[in-house]
Amino acid sequence: MSTSHLPHAFPPFPSVVLVVCAHNSGRSQMAAAFLAHLGEDRGEIRSAGPALADTVNPAVVEAMRGSGIGISAEAVRAPTS
């Protein structure tokens, strides 16, 4: 998806964006994937959570697949990793 038709929709990306949610198994994974997709990989996007789940939520993986964005290879991470 190109954002060229929205020249002012996205400000310049900082060098790193960290998206954090409680377990890093759903919301932060989705937000990071959408940022990377819509931002056309203009910056480094990371997601993390302080109380990690074991894996990324399978329902989130499926929902993102429905949006054309694959996150099945993502792993949950603590903010320090």
Image (cartoon, grey):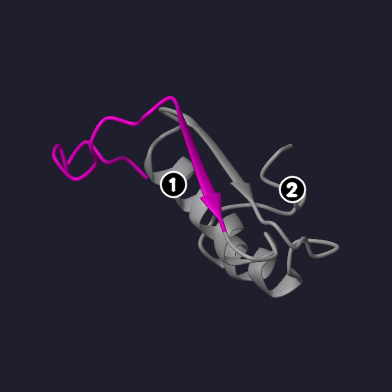
**If you read the primary sequence from the N terminus, does the residue marked by circle 1 or circle 2 appear first?**
1
- As shown in the figure, which amino acid type bears the numbered disc 2? Arg
Name the outermost residue toward the left: 8
**Image quarter of residue 54:** bottom right
- As shown in the figure, which amino acid type bears the numbered disc 1? Leu
Whether residue 52 is situated above or below residue 13 in the rendered picture: below
Name the element at disc 1: helix
Name the element at disc 2: loop
The residue segment tinted magenta is 1-20
Question: Which residue is depicted at the point 70% across and 39% down?
Answer: 80
Seen from the viewer's position, the closer of residues 62 and 79 is: 79
Q: Position of residue 6 (x, y in %)?
A: 17, 43
Res 36 seen here: yes
The disc placed on residue 54 is none
Question: Which residue is depicted at the point 41% across and 34% down?
Answer: 40
Q: For the residue carrying disc 1, how many other residues have a C-alpha within 10 Å: few (<14), some (14-19), or many (20+)?
A: many
Q: Is residue 9 magenta?
A: yes
Whether residue 71 is situated above or below residue 12 in the rendered picture: below
Q: Position of residue 1 (x, y in %)?
A: 37, 45
Tell me if 39 is positioned left or right of 50 in this view. Answer: left
Chief secondary structure of the magenta span?
A: loop
Disc 2: which residue: 77
Tell me if 47 is positioned left or right of 38 in this view. Answer: right
Question: Which residue is depicted at the point 80% across and 65% down?
Answer: 53
- Image quarter where the C terminus lies is top right
**Image quarter of residue 27:** bottom right
Q: Position of residue 42 (x, y in %)?
A: 41, 28
Name the outermost residue toward the bottom: 59
Whether residue 65 is situated above or below residue 9 in the rendered picture: below
Q: Position of residue 69 (x, y in %)?
A: 56, 53
Question: Which residue is depicted at the point 38% across and 38% down?
Answer: 39
The disc placed on residue 35 is 1
